[in-house]
Amino acid sequence: IVDRVEHGMYRYYLFSVPCEDCVLGISLCPISEGDPDLYVNKGANLLPTRDANDFRSNSVRGDFLQISSKDVVFSQKRTTIKGEYTIGIYGDSNCTYSLAVMTSSSTLLELSNGIPVRQEQQKNDIRYFVFYSWKKESINVKLGLNSGRVAIRANVIQDVREENVIERLPYNDLKSVWSS
């Protein structure tokens, strides 16, 4: 989704998580100058705000939330991750942004062509992404790094139904066809 929020205003979206034990990933990336913030509530009836929310990320220049079934919110509310979520985007300033929402049974997040994704992670944490391409063409990956160091590794998997995908994950330079 590409949309716009004005300074001091909210934009809201509804998303349904169909699984009981999965990961919900929400990426918010500004396309123009500005700083959108991300707020999320479980349920379709309560709009999240800066002051009242179940989950939030208000980093400078984009946000990423990864919500898992193990988050404390679910035990406190005596519920599971499955269900409706209301996503609120607050404009700290006027901003055009892209919003990507995805679910996965692991931390394997799907990338889409031309849609930026913001990702934060801890030292020594490994995150896997998947990008589907049906054409035989070059793929460009652009990485903006705020701090720290990063290693990018990639593998080509022809048919995920026939190959052991777990064994093909590029977790080191020897297990990848390309690395940074």
Image: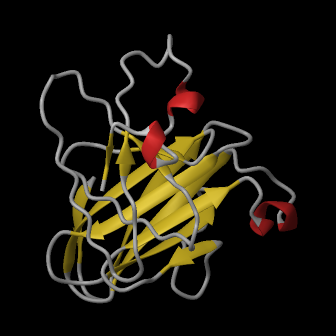
Residue 127 image point, x, y percent: 51, 54
Q: In this image, 74 relative to 130: left or right? A: right
Report the number of discs: 0
Question: Against 120, is 131 above or below?
Answer: above
Residue 141 image point, x, y percent: 22, 52
Residue 52 image point, x, y percent: 61, 82
Q: In this image, 48 relative to 31: left or right? A: right
Q: Residue at x 79, y 68 (%)?
A: 72
- Is residue 78 at all visible to an observer of this figure? yes
- Which residue, as the protein is rendered here, is positioned at the far top? 162
Question: Against 44, is 94 above or below?
Answer: below
Query: Could you say which is closer to the camera, residue 133 or residue 77?
Result: 133
Residue 154 image point, x, y percent: 36, 42
Q: Residue at x 66, y 44 (%)?
A: 22
Question: Against 47, is 19 above or below?
Answer: above
Q: Residue at x 45, y 83 (%)?
A: 58
**Which picture quadrant has residue 90?**
bottom left
Q: In this image, 87 relative to 10: left or right? A: right
